């Protein structure tokens, strides 16, 4: 799992489950800083979120790690942090294309 997300930037707002839902990407965690994210990655992440099942009380999804395999999950995935309206962590999930 990634380090805690410290800062993020809005990619776009969508309607998900009948409510506004924010798509973001991490710009800083406890151990690294990201200054930019390719538009193609933003687009791919947006498509994945639009078809994904998200927690009912989630108000945002933050891309913490770009698509990659990991030791515990060999399939390429986006590491995604879900938060509620108040910015409280709900869960972190691997999402797939």
Image (spheres, rainbow, N blue to C red):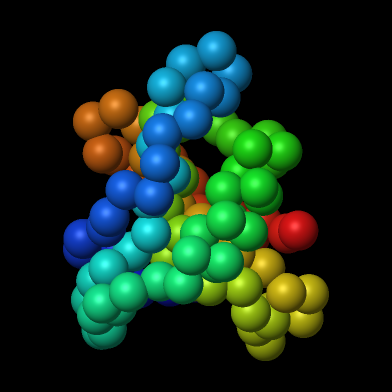
Q: Position of residue 52 (x, y in %)?
A: 69, 40
In depth, the one of 91 and 13 nearer the eye is: 13
Classify 84 as above or below 90. above
Left or right: 6, with 57 as reference point: left
Left or right: 59, with 14 as reference point: left
Residue 87: quarter of image: top left
Report the residue at 40% width, 71% height from top.
37
Q: Where is residue 90 in the image (x, y as percent from the top left)?
A: 42, 41
Report the residue at 38% width, 59% height from top.
25
Report the residue at 21% width, 60% height from top.
7
Classify 32 as above or below 95. below
Classify 61 as above or below 28. above
Classify 24 as above or below 94. above
Left or right: 25, with 94 as reference point: left
Report the residue at 46% width, 72% height from top.
38
Residue 56 in view: no
Numbered-mark total: 0
Q: Where is residue 73 in the image (x, y as percent from the top left)?
A: 72, 75
In depth, the one of 40 and 60 nearer the eye is: 40
Residue 80 in view: yes
In depth, the one of 91 and 28 nearer the eye is: 28
- Placement of the C terminus among the 4 image quadrants: bottom right
Q: Position of residue 71 (x, y in %)?
A: 67, 86
Q: Which residue lies furthest to the front in this view?
A: 39
């Amino acid at each position: 799992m990634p380090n805690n997300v410290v800062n993020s930037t809005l990619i776009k707002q969508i309607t998900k489950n009948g409510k506004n839902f924010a798509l973001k990407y991490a710009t800083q965690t406890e151990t690294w800083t990201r200054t930019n994210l390719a538009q193609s990655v933003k687009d791919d992440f947006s498509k994945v979120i639009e078809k994904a099942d998200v927690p009912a009380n989630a108000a945002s999804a933050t891309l913490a790690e770009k698509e990659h395999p990991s030791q515990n999950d060999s399939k390429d995935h986006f590491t995604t942090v879900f938060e509620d309206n108040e910015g409280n962590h709900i869960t972190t999930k691997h999402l797939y294309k």
